[in-house]
Every structure is written in structure tokens, then in C-alpha cells.
Image: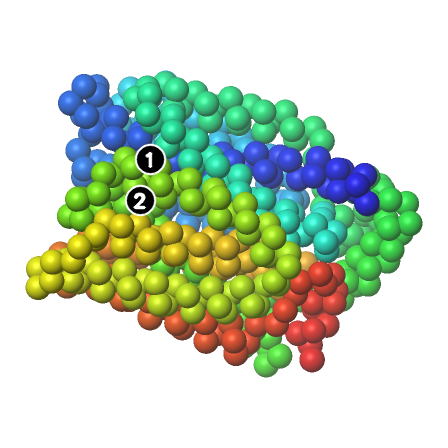
Amino acid sequence: MLSSTFHQTLSAFSVFCSSFLYGLGAGWNGPGFNLLTSSNSTFHLSLNDVTWITSLPTAFSTFLTIIFFIFMNNYSRKKLIIYNIFLYFVSWILCLISNKSAILLISKIICDCGNAIYDIIACIYIGEISSPHNRGIFGALLIIFFSFGNEIEELLGIFNNYSLLSAFPLIVSIIGLCSLFFMVESPYYLSLKNKTEETMTVLSFLYSEKEAENRFREILEYCEENNENINFFQYLIAPQNLKLCTAIVITNAVVYFSSFDVLLSYGALIVRPLKINSTVFMNFFGIQICIFILISLITVKILGRRVLMFYGFLALTLIQFCIGLLLALEEGNNYKLLYIPQIFFSLISLFLFSYMLSVYPTIHVLRTEIFPSKLKDRATCILVIFKKISEFVVTSSFFPLSTIIGMSSNFFIYSVVSAVGAYFVYKFLKETRDKTLAEIKNDYKT
């Protein structure tokens, strides 16, 4: 058991490095743009420049995801991870040597294209190389590495050194490239390509001899149907699949249509009217993400997927409504509440507790478990596209809506959307904890 877990961890290490790099890229934005917009910076970036440098990469990565949707079957899981880490490596070199906003923009576009590949393939690869008892933990580890990467960049921002902010991720990307030597191809992918001998070789590395034989039979049985010519769109609209696929797509979109990305990107600006120190708030935010996501290792394993998603959405509905109510009272100046900073910090803690322990890590695991192997690549592309659309809508609409109808109204909208997510989880999703991919497939047939 320990040997199997060690070899699975060794093979997954490159993906964990990629997740860490994803987090470093997200964490760079706060301290990085703070330095580049200062009067001492040679970039002389305006807030409008920052907006373009932040939003344009999302548009490019969404376009890349659509391209991958078309040509996905031409690339193996391992090859995509190689492309992913290499793009991070190139982007951080450009970021480190950039002295113009145009080079910085290219760097961020390349980095976000790497993020798009990660979003598509990381969960698939982890789900296919890990055993059922490790799959939930490995899925949560992806979020843990992302969270720690984000917080480390926030901490490095204390030194006000642009080179340090960019050099550290470059070093990590070099480590990630070196770790590819220990990475094996997905046995499910090899089986789908009828590479029987290579499939058994990989399974012998990942599992003990007896367990490898059992896994080999399970994979052959699981992939037998998928080796047929399955049409992706016919699969989606089939009566037995339509409700499930719709629920997964909507649930995935709802997870990211929340105040998390808003608080992560604009938290320092949101807390200014509340007279809260922005530096203190962002570090408080990042540290709690790391703490709660560590606890999620236990919750995802013990409580299961469906329970976490349902009660997580219910909690987010209530908490985001309360945040909106607090901001509405402050905006109206009708009530002078005491201890507003303390109340706001408490609500944010409850939000992060609910978000990071339930819906956020669980959706990453579910994305690996629902679709047949031959369709999983394209299905994940669809989920990533909707994820990026949700993130783009939330981050691009926050300040315009705040100007028109007030900042509090955004949080009321997020609350309603979370309630919709709870309904879809309750109505359509089934439990997948400790089940093989074949067993999950059979559950959804009944």
C-alpha cells in the first residue's frame, strides 16, 4: 500500500508542481501590479493597463481551450503536462526580463495558456493514475499546492522586489521540468490506444503485482465500450446522460460564479470603505485558504462528494447574502454598526471555511469521475470553458455593477447562484466516494 502510494505520488509530482506554479501566477498579480503601478516603476502602468493585462490572457486561454476541444485526442496526458510546464517556464523568463508592458502582456498570455492546459488535464491525469483511496487526497493536494503558491507570492511581495517575485516561479518551473523524468503515462489513455504491454508496465510501477493485475482487468473492462466510436454530442444529448451532463456543467460554472475570485482579485479595494488594512486582509485571506484547504484532505475523504457540494452551496448562499447585507448597510449609511471590520472578517472566514472545505476541492475530484475516458478530455474542455466564462463575468462585471446598483448587489447575486447550485447537486448528482471509475459509470446508468 505504501509503495503504491509512493509511486503514484512520484508520478503525480509534476502535476503538483504545475498546480504550485498556477498558484504562484495567481499570487503574483497583487504584489506585482502594486509594484508596477508605483511612481518608482519604469513600466508606468495605469489601472487601465492592468485591466488589459489581466483580462486579455483569459480571452486567449479560452480560445486555446476551444482548440484543444477539437484536437484533444491527438495528445497524450503526459505530453500535455509537458507543454503546460514548458509554457510556465517560458512565461516566467519573459516576466523576469521584461521592461515593457507589451512583453509583460505576452508573458501573462503564455502563462494563462499554461493555466488552460492545466485546467483541462490535471484532474484527468490524477484521477487515472491514482487508486480510489488516494484519488480524493490527490485531488485536494492540487488545490493545496495552488493555495500555497498563491500565498508564497503574497509573502514575497513584502520585499517589494520585482525580480524576486518572478525569479522564484522560474526556479519552480525548472524543478517541474526535471520532475517529468519520473512521470508515467495514464494507463487509461494507453489502454484506449490499445497499447496493452505499455499499460501493464505503467500499472506495475503504480501498484503492487496483484493489484496491478486487478487494475488491468478493470481498465480493460472500463475502456472496452470506450474503444468504440462514441460521438461526443450524441453522448451529451442521450436521455440517460443529458440531465447528468447539464448538472455537472452548471454546478462547475456555479462554483466559480462566486465571490471567491472577486475577493482574491479585488479584496484590497473592497475593504477600503470598511477601513480595513488591505495588506492585513489579503494575508489573512491567503493564510486561511491554506489552512482550510489542508483540512479539506479529510473532509473530501470522509464526508464524500455529494454531501460536501450540497451543504457547501447552502452555506455559501447564506454567507454571501450576509456579506451583501453588511455592505448594503454600510453603503446606505442608515446604520452605524459597531465592529464592522470584525464582522466582515468573521464572514470572510465563514465563507472560506465553506468554500475551501466543500465545493472548491470537490468539483476538481468530480471532474475526474463522471465522464467515460474517451470523452473525458473534451468534456473537461467544456467544463473549463464554462469555468473561464464564469470567472470572466464575475471579475469584469463587479465594478460596473457596483457603480450602477451598489457593491452589495453583487453578493446578493452570488448568493442566488449558489442556491441554484445546491438545487442541481441535490437533484442530479450521486455519491462517488471510494468507487472505481467503472463503478461510478454503472451508478449513473441506473
Measured from the top left, where is residue 185 in percent x and y?
72, 41
Q: How many marks?
A: 2
The local secondary structure at tag 1 comes to helix
Residue sticking out furthest to the right: 210
* Residue 369 seen: no
323 or 377, which is in the foreground?
A: 323
Amino acid on which disc 2 is placed: Ser
Residue sticking out furthest to the front: 338
Picture quadrant of residue 102: top left
Q: Is residue 318 left or right of residue 100?
A: right
Q: Give the residue number, with chain letter if any, for mark 2.
A: 265
Measured from the top left, where is residue 114 in percent x and y?
48, 39
Q: Is residue 374 left or right of residue 383?
A: right
> Could you tell me how far apart the alpha carbons at marks 1 and 2 are, in whole angstroms?
8 Å
Q: Characterize the local packing of mark 2: few (<14), some (14-19) or many (20 or more) Cα atoms within 10 angstroms.
A: some
Amino acid on which disc 1 is placed: Asn
305 or 127, which is in the foreground?
A: 305
Which residue is painted at 50% across and 27% down in the image? 89
Marks 2 and 1: in contact by CB < 8 Å?
A: yes
Q: Give the residue number, with chain letter if any, for mark 1.
A: 29
Q: Characterize the local packing of mark 1: few (<14), some (14-19) or many (20 or more) Cα atoms within 10 angstroms.
A: many
Relative to 28, say whether 303 is above or below: below
Measured from the top left, where is residue 52 in percent x and y?
25, 40
Q: Quadrant of the C terminus?
A: bottom right
Picture quadrant of residue 285: top left
* Residue 42 seen: yes
Sequence-wise, which precedes: disc 1 or disc 2? 1
As drawn, the label of residue 305 is: none
Measured from the top left, where is residue 58 in percent x and y?
37, 46
